[in-house]
Amino acid sequence: MGFVKGLKCRECAREYPVDPIYVCEFCFGPLEVLYDIESIKKVMTRELIESRPHNLWRYRELLPIDRDPTSGLHSGYTPLVRADKLAKHLGMKELYIKDDTVTHPTLSFKDRVVAIALSKAREFGFDTVACASTGNLAHSVSAHGAAGGFNRFIFIPASLERSKIIASLAYEPNLIAVDGNYDDVNRLCSEVANKYNWAFVNINIRPFYAEGSKTQGYEIVEQLGWKAPDAVVVPCASGSLLTKIWKSFKEMKEIGLIDNLNTKVFSAQATGCSPIVKAIKDDVDVIKPVKPDTIAKSLAIGNPADGYYATKVIKETGGFGADVSDDEIISAIKLMAKTEGIFAETAGGVTLASAMKLIESGHIDRDAVTVLSITGNGLKTKEAIVGHTVEPHHIDPNMKSFEEILKKING
Ligand SMILES: *Cc1c(COP(=O)(O)O)cnc(C)c1O
Ligand SMILES: [Zn+2]
C-alpha cells in the first residue's frame, strides 16, 4: 500500500481522487500528488532506505504508487561524483556532479520519471503509453514501454538530433515525427490525449510522472551523507525537475531525514531558449514564451509548463539563473569530459557553463557545497560537438610513422 491521499490543485488547493487527470476543473491549475506525510514520517528512516537495493525505488514511500513497482527496477541511484579537478579549475572548494549520464537504461534522467509513469499506467490498467518529447523522453518511453509490453506512441519534433531518433527507433515504437517545434508537438498531444484513452506520461499522467524527478534530489542528499547542498544548478526545459529537486529536499526535512535546509536553487538555460532565466533576471512572475533556437534541443521548450513554479522556487531559496550560448555549451561539454571524464549531452554543457557564470558573478559562493545536475549522456548529442573536437593523428602502420607523430605530440 502507498501513502498517497489524492491529488491537489497547486492553485486553489481543491482535492481530487487518484485518477489519470492533471488539471483542476475549477481553476485550470495543475494537479499535484498529496501524501500522508505524518504516516510516512513514522516508517521512513535513513536505515530503512539504506537497507534497500540501489535504485530509485528505495524512496518508494514518497513515490505515488500503490502496488509494487513494475518499471525502472534498475534505474536511478546514479553516482554523485566529487569533481575536484573541475572544482580547482573553477576556484571552488567542494563541487559535485550528479551524474545522470549513466541512468539505466537510456542514459538520461528521464528514466526516473518514466519509471514512475509506467508503474502508475500499469496500476491504472492502460495498455498504451505515449509522450510528447524533446528527445530523451522519447528514448526512455520507447525502452521502458517495450520492457513493460505496452503499445507506444511517441511524438517528437521532426528536427531532433538523428542520434536521438535512432536511439528511440531501436525499440520499434510508433514514432510520430511532427513538422513543428516541441510546443507544437505538445499542443497536438493534448488534443490526442483528450480523444484516445492512452497514458500520456507527461500529460494525463504528469502529476505522477513528475514525482520521479524527486529521486534525483533524494539521492543527492543521501550521497552527501544525509545533507542538503548549499547550491544546486539545474537545467530547465519545462522547469519540472528544478521544482521537484526542491520539493524532495523539503520533504526530507519535513520527515526528519535531514536537520537543516538552506539550499539555493539555480536555473540553467540556453540563451536560445531561456524564458525561465529571463523571468528571473527581469524579476517578473510572468513567463514570456519564446521560439527556441539552440543546440540544447532537450531543453528547447519555449512555453514551459512549470516555468512559473520554477521561478517561485528560485526566488524563495535565494537562487538565480544564467543562460549560455551554443559556443559556451560546447566548451563546457569538453571541459567536463577533459577534467572529470564525464561526457554529457548539450543539457550538461548548459548546466556547467551556467554554473561558471553564476560563480563568476558571485551568485554562487566559492565555498558553497555545490551540486551540478548533469542529466544526459554525450553519446546522445554527438552532432553538437562534431567539428569542435581535436582530430585523430593519422599514421602509416609502422613504427617509424608512429614515432614521427609522437615527436610532434611531445614537441
Ligand atoms: C527533460 C530534460 C531536462 C529537464 O526537464 P524539465 O522539463 O525541466 O523537467 C533536463 N535535462 C535533460 C537532458 C532532459 O532530457
Ligand atoms: Zn484549482
Image: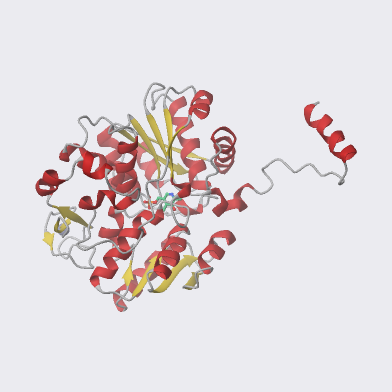
Residue nearer the viewer, 43 or 301: 43
The percent coordinates of residue 345 (x first, y second) are: 53, 48
Does residue 246 appear anywhere in the picture? yes
Asked if residue 21 is positioned above or below residue 344 in the image, the reply reads below
Color theme of the render: secondary structure
The percent coordinates of residue 315 (x first, y second) are: 28, 36
- For ligand 2, which image quadrant applies? bottom left
Residue nearer the viewer, 181 or 338: 338
Q: Please report the residue visible at 38 percent of the width from the left and 23 percent of the height from the top.
A: 365
Q: Please report the residue visible at 56 percent of the width from the left and 40 percent of the height from the top.
A: 333
Q: Please report the residue visible at 40 percent of the width from the left and 64 percent of the height from the top.
A: 144
The percent coordinates of residue 265 (x first, y second) are: 33, 36
Residue nearer the viewer, 303 or 241: 241
Q: Which residue is most to the right?
A: 400
Q: Please report the residue visible at 30 percent of the width from the left and 55 percent of the height from the top.
A: 210
Left or right side of 277 for 226? left
Q: Which residue is most to the front?
A: 51
In the rendered image, which quarter contains the N terminus? bottom left
Does residue 161 appear anywhere in the picture? no
Image quadrant in which you'd find residue 320 = top left
Residue nearer the viewer, 13 or 366: 366
Left or right side of 240 for 80? right
In the rendered image, which quarter contains the C terminus? top right
